[in-house]
Image (cartoon, grey):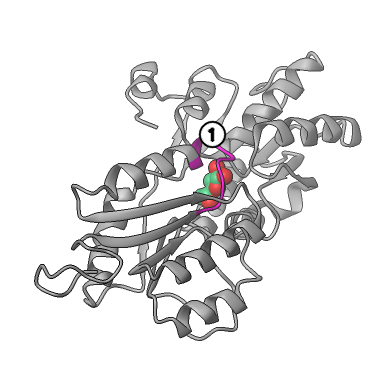
Amino acid sequence: ATTGGGTPQAGGGSDLIKVGFSQLGAESGWRTANTESVKFNLTKENGFDLTFVDAQQKQENQIKALRDFIDQGVDVIAFSPVIETGWDEVLQDIKDAEIPVVLVDRTVDTTVADPFVTWIGADFTKEGVTAGEWVKANHPDAKIFELQGTMGSGAQTNRQEGFRSIVGDNVIGEASGNFTRAEGKAATEAALAAYPDMDLIFAHNDDMGLGAIEAIEATGKKPGVDIKIVTVDGVKDGLQALVDKKFNYVVECNPAFGDQLAELIKKVAAGEQVEKSTIVVDEAFDQTITQEFVDSRTF
Ligand code: GYE
């Protein structure tokens, strides 16, 4: 409740902005850092009454959380959709309840008109292109295995599309590792057997690349040398692997945009005009980064 000039509002009793945030999970270092950044910025001191719910990478959990937010009559709903489709009904219900939606990180594909007020996240297609261009310039004959993120997520479909627009002809195999270290390892074990001549892995995130390192080392091969590894995210563990020369190239995807999110939510709650999208700016790193740089990384 933001209006009323200090008069207590029904149910709220304060001028804090009631925000329901549905996080999709805790699958990766990126996600953990993103959650920390959200919680660090959406505090009472900053004017927010945050309800945070982790969906454990299950869409049904997310839909339930969103319905609970409608029932609670929050001022703003923010959510990171685990996959792109399947939101039509709940988005329509949120719209009917006249609760503004701020889409965070991943994207939706829906038939609902104007399903969200604003979206903040990274340009996943560009991340894939950046990775592809590095491969094309440095390993033009690479035989690539693509370790995909959660199938049907914006981060997977768009990174794949961007990457393949540059080096699609070099991709000899693909499998999903669901953005987790354990599944990335398992998928790489299977790939090492199925595609013995693969010599480069493009992993859609650091965690799956870190799982791939374990699988490669278990066969006696050298990650970063016998099998090159290119990833996306640039969380501390990923950059450490780059300094250790087990990763070859990392395209950044910065998770620490909770401050920008807080500003957006404030404006949306106040009914102010906001940009339809906010792109979080990313860099890319190769093996020339220093240990000091990695040590100073905050996520
Ligand atoms: O790259 C990955 C996480 O949606 C950008 O999700 C996010 C991705 C991120 O699991 O590590």
Residue 145 is at least partly visible in this image: yes
Report the span colored magenta.
23-31
User: Which quarter of the figure is the C terminus placed in?
Assistant: top left
Q: Could you tell whether 156 is left or right of 101 in the image?
A: right
Residue 197 higher or lower than 12, as above or below: above
**Label 1 crowd bin: few (<14), some (14–19), many (20+), radius 10 Å:** many
Among the 4 quarters of the image, the one containing residue 63? bottom right
Which three-letter amino acid code belongs to the residue tagged 1? Tyr
Q: Is residue 126 within the magenta segment?
A: no
Q: Which residue is mark 1?
A: 249
Q: Nearer the viewer, residue 195 or 73?
A: 73
Q: Residue at x 66, y 41 (%)?
A: 202
User: Which quarter of the figure is the N terminus placed in?
Assistant: bottom left
Give the percent coordinates (x, y) of residue 15.
Answer: 18, 63
Residue 130 is at least partly visible in this image: no
Q: Nearer the viewer, residue 113 or 173?
A: 113
Q: Could you tell whether 47 is left or right of 222 in the image?
A: left
Give the residue furthest to the left: 5
Q: Residue at x 43, y 24 (%)?
A: 288
For label 1, the SS is strand
Residue 227 higher or lower than 203, as above or below: above
Q: Residue at x 53, y 60 (%)?
A: 65
**Tally of numbered tags:** 1
Q: Residue at x 64, y 59 (%)?
A: 59
Q: Nearer the viewer, residue 5 or 217?
A: 5
Q: Nearer the viewer, residue 255 or 192?
A: 255
Give the residue furthest to the top: 220
Give the percent coordinates (x, y) of residue 135.
Answer: 61, 41
